[in-house]
Image (cartoon, grey):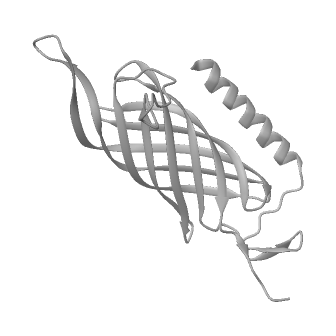
Amino acid sequence: MEKLVFGIIIILFFGLNNTIAQEMVNPKDDFLYDGKYFDPYSPYVTIGAGYGMNFEQQEGEQNIAVDFHMNFENIATNLGYFSSTDRFLNGSGGLRQYPSRQRLHDIHLGAGWRHERLKHNFAVYAGASFAAGRTPTVTDEGIDAFIIRRTPGLYLQAHYSHKPVYDVGYGATLYFAYSRFFKIVGVQAHIFLSSAFKAYNR
């Protein structure tokens, strides 16, 4: 886990350094670029998957997340869904990559800061969440069982996206989901899809 996080930090550092070395464009209003019309700081979606450490159970587990991000004046906001478990696509075996005895579904709403340039987007968000899922327990008879949990919590995330084109990109997300029964920190790879492209009449 430590090597993975260190590797992501190195990639982010060199990615940002390379971007800063380029000519910077930081438009605040609608603009034309490469023959196309764009609206900066438009709403965007990130769709990610990755690996995290569940400190409550002391186990690693896989996760997925979908977040919608939107600016209100100078305040960036996000609404998202995060799921962390040992298994996805249940059915004929599913995709079981990392053993975990818990399952979390987390819906979060937050606010933060966003910085967008021609080739990159960086944002940090923090907010409240509603965590629902199950945690393992052992009965008096020694039988493994699960307890259903529902609790408020906190969700933090920071992500960087490199944009080969202005409204489509890819990147990495660092996140932390915290509540009474679920404490998970990890990293995800994500795709970035923006609504910045606008049609116009010549």
The C terminus: image quadrant: bottom right
Vertical side of 7 occupied by 67: above or below: below
Residue 64's x, y, as percent?
Answer: 50, 41
Residue at 89% from the left image edge and 50% from the top image edge? 22
| Residue ranking furthest to the top | 142
Quadrant of the snapshot with the N terminus:
top right
Spot occupied by residue 146 in the image (x, y as percentages of width and height):
23, 27
Seen as rendered, the residue at the extreme left is 140
Question: Residue 33 sits in which quadrant?
Answer: bottom right
The image position of residue 134, as x and y in percent, is 27, 33
Picture residue at 72% right of the left edge, 62% below the top: 167
Decide: is 31 above or below 162: below
Viewed as shown, does residue 196 lie left or right of 96? right
Q: Nearer the viewer, residue 117 or 59?
A: 59
Q: Residue furthest bottom?
A: 201
Q: Position of residue 94 (x, y in %)?
A: 47, 31
Residue at left offset 35%, top offset 48%:
129
At a point 34% along the width and 28% down the height, the residue shown is 102
Q: Decide: is 198 above or below 140.
A: below
- Which one is nearer the viewer's eye here, 131 or 176? 131
